[in-house]
Image (cartoon, rainbow, N blue to C red):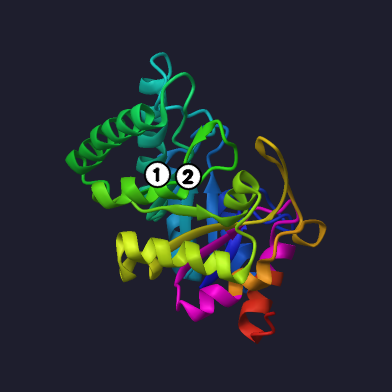
Amino acid sequence: MLFGTAGVPISSRARDTASGVARIKELGLGCMEIEFVRGVKMGESTAREVRKVAEKEKVALSVHAPYFINLNSNEKAAASAQRIKDSARIGALCGAGDIVFHAAYYQKNSKERTYQIVKKQLEEILQWLDARKIKVRLRPETTGRKMQFGTLEEIIKLSSELENVLPCVDFSHIHARTRAYNSYEEFSEILAEIEEGLGREALKNMQVHVSGIEYGHAGEKRHLNLGESDFKYRELLKAFKDFKAEGAVICESPNLEEDALLLREEYKTGGIL
């Protein structure tokens, strides 16, 4: 497992993406998620420079597409699809192989109808990417609020039915949404469900989000540092080890690299449970 941050580390001397990648290497972390969450504002020349730095430092990159995505909206679907396409195009130039996004809100549609709409939209995006030879995986994320499309079951089903689609599993979101799934046994249940639905390769190519989390009846409220939350990250790391999971673990705690380093050290030392 590689461990890294959602965005440029707080301790980076400069706030640009290339400097952030270099700081990831200095910290001894292995991956970073490029945050396009407020819009894809990076140009092509900058993206190519980011790729050079990432390849030199051997830092694995992924991208989080803008938050303003709802593929289940008549008014916003086209713009939402374009944001995913833009994220994929610039992300691929950066050398990122995985494009993470929150796919949709249910709104007034049933869960089944929302699923079919999201699937059709993703099929069209995948065709667009293929026509332009943009080699990335789309990673719809498990979401933290009950009004959002993105249960584990929905994301596994999408991934089983569409090529070049795999889950981004946000374990903190699943915990917040269900107010459960916060023990070694329950984390193992999630990993077993992924393996059953998508095969062993899905566990060897994971994209994971982890943070502390505050939640209520409707689900996620806000991210917290791990030490301020009830999230049992040590038990999650134990499950990763026992299932021989591989991939990228992106820390979304407010303190970013502090908790990313905590996760890495806990995982390395095996001092779990």
Farthest residue in the right direction?
228
Check disc 2 and report its element: helix, strand or loop: loop
- Residue 185, image x and y in percent? 57, 70
Q: Residue at x 36, y 66 (%)?
A: 195
- Residue 9, image x and y in percent? 67, 56
- Residue 90, image x and y in percent? 40, 42
> Magenta segment, which residues?
238-261
Farthest residue in the top direction?
75
Number of residue marks: 2
Q: In this view, does 70 lie above or below 63?
A: above
Dot 2 crowding, Cα within 10 Å, few <14, some 14–19, many 20+:
many
Question: Which quarter of the figure has residue 5?
Answer: bottom right
Q: Residue at x 60, y 73 (%)?
A: 237
Q: Which of 231 and 89 is in front in this view?
A: 231
Q: Are marks 2 and 1 in contact (CB under 8 Å)?
A: yes
Q: Mark 2 points at which residue?
A: 151
Q: Residue at x 46, y 18 (%)?
A: 108
Q: Can residue 62 be seen in this view?
A: yes
Q: Mark 1 points at which residue?
A: 154
